[in-house]
Image: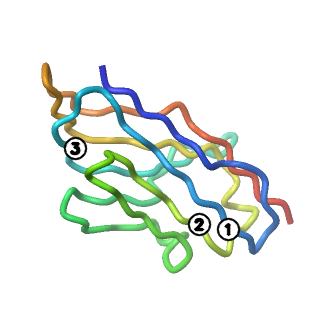
């Protein structure tokens, strides 16, 4: 079974930076797209940024120019560098992997458990 483990969340002041990491494990051959989502209290989960296996990226308008998504295919890890953080970025951040090919199966989607990011004003 594929397991996604996030790290790097925390409390930061407005204008600060954080770097999130998410490592996938479980006898993985390949992963198609990887992405970061976030969910603020009382709001729906929303896509923050995504990256294909070839490195193409897309971002939510609210984070363009401030956040950068990247991945290390050899480590099955996706990162989210968050700069110029704002209080409205406060949320639980989840990583997601699409179409994970392992030694025994293909998983269409896998989610991490979430990591809290809190930005104080």
Q: Residue at x 58, y 43 (%)?
A: 7
Of the numbered discs in the image, which one, if any, rests on residue 100?
A: none
Q: Which residue is identified by label 3? A: 31
Badge 3 or badge 1: first in the primary sequence: 1
Q: Earlier in the sequence, mark 3 or mark 2?
A: 3
Judged from this view, the residue extending furthest toward the right is 121
Picture quadrant where residue 109 is located: top left
Q: Nearer the viewer, residue 3 or 35?
A: 3
The residue at which mark 2 appears reads as 82
Secondary structure of residue under mark 1? loop
Q: Earlier in the sequence, mark 2 or mark 1?
A: 1
As drawn, 51 above or below 34:
below
Mark 1 surroundings within 10 Å by alpha-carbon count, few (fewer than 14), some (14 through 19), many (20 or more): some
Residue at 52% x, 40% y is 6
Query: Is 47 on the left-hand or right-hand side of 91?
Result: left
Q: Spatial distance from mark 3 to mark 1, Cα to Cα?
A: 27 Å
Q: Is residue 68 left or right of residue 35?
A: right
Callout 3: 10 Å neighbours few (<14), some, many (20+)? many
Q: Establish if 34 lies above or below 102.
A: below
Where is residue 37 shown, x and y percent of the image?
48, 49
Q: Which numbered dot is residue 17?
A: 1
Is 35 left or right of 91, judged from the image as shown?
Answer: left
Foreground residue among 47 and 27: 27
Dot 2, how many residues are within 10 Å of its Cα: few (below 14), some (14-19), or many (20+)?
many
Determine the image quadrant of residue 82.
Answer: bottom right
Q: Residue at x 21, y 35 (%)?
A: 100
* Mark-to-mark CA distance, 3 and 2: 23 Å
């Amino acid at each position: 079974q594929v397991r996604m483990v996030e790290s790097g969340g925390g409390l930061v002041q407005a204008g600060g930076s954080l770097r999130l990491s998410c490592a996938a494990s479980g006898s993985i051959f390949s992963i198609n797209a990887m992405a970061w989502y976030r969910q603020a209290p009382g709001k729906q989960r929303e896509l923050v940024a995504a990256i294909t296996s070839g490195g193409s990226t897309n971002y939510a308008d609210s984070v363009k120019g401030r956040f950068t998504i990247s991945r290390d295919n050899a480590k099955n890890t996706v990162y989210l560098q968050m700069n110029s953080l704002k209080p409205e970025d406060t949320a639980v951040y989840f990583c997601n992997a699409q179409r994970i090919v392992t030694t025994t199966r293909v998983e269409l989607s896998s989610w991490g458990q979430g990591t809290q990011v809190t930005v104080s004003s």
